[in-house]
Image: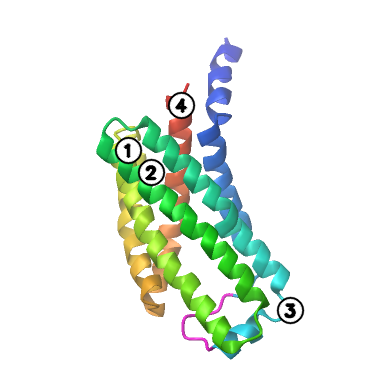
Amino acid sequence: MSTAVAHPRRAILTSLPAVVGIAYSASWIAGLTVGAPAPTFADSGSEIIRELSGHTGAFDTQFLLTEGLPAIGLAVVSLALARAARTPLVTRLAAVTGVAAALISFTQFLLGLALARTGSPDSAHLLFELTSRFDGAKMFLLAGLSVAAVQSRLLPRWLSYTAIAMAVAIVGSGIAYLFLIQGLAILAFVSGPLLLIVITGTGIVLGREGR
């Protein structure tokens, strides 16, 4: 009796969208535990170089875990959502916003590697600014992906409400990062955890739908 109940649950959690959705959050959480420097929008190129000096490995690791690997998760979950969606509009919205966000995330990973290695203050400032502004653009796309998830009608009610809250919060974060407004950047502490819940939760739901 217990085996018959447990087996479907294990199957859900071992389907590709579910595994990738869980790995997305695990990678992000691991990345946030890395003791890497965190320059602010107001820092000059020289200050950024000074902050990153001696921390190349930690900075690389953090960007791998928060931008490089999560790019794969975004692509897989968004394409799975597009495949499961019941209307062409939601299918297009999920595919376009999710894949575009994944491409930006991977671009940020490459920019982060370049930033950690530059010795030019001008280059450091430009690379950091580009990485931050790309983050803002990615956040707007993630808001669109969240809307697609809600409109798919596949999510349970609690996750739909979470996705709506995430879309609102991440638009605020997107404004902060796109326009380099340090005072609004604190919104990322709200939108970030909500994003992890939405991506992981959506992956698990899609894993169940795929059974």
Image coords of residue 111 (percent x, y): 56, 69
Determine the image quadrant of residue 84: top left
User: How far separated are the C-alphas under marks 1 and 2?
Assistant: 6 Å
- In this view, the residue in front, 189 or 72, is 72
152 shown above or below 118:
above
Image coords of residue 122 (percent x, y): 55, 87
Marker disc for residue 208:
4
Compare marks 3 and 2 and give the one earlier in the sequence.
Answer: 3
Is 71 included in the stretch rendered in magenta?
no
Q: Mark 1 points at which residue?
A: 91
Q: In this rendering, which labeled residue sits more in front, label 1 or label 3?
A: 1
Callout 1: few (<14), some (14-19), or many (20+) C-alpha neighbours within 10 Å? many
- Horizontal side of 154 relative to 89 (left or right) equals right
Residue type at mark 2 is Ala
Residue type at mark 1 is Thr
User: How far separated are the C-alphas under marks 3 and 2?
Assistant: 39 Å
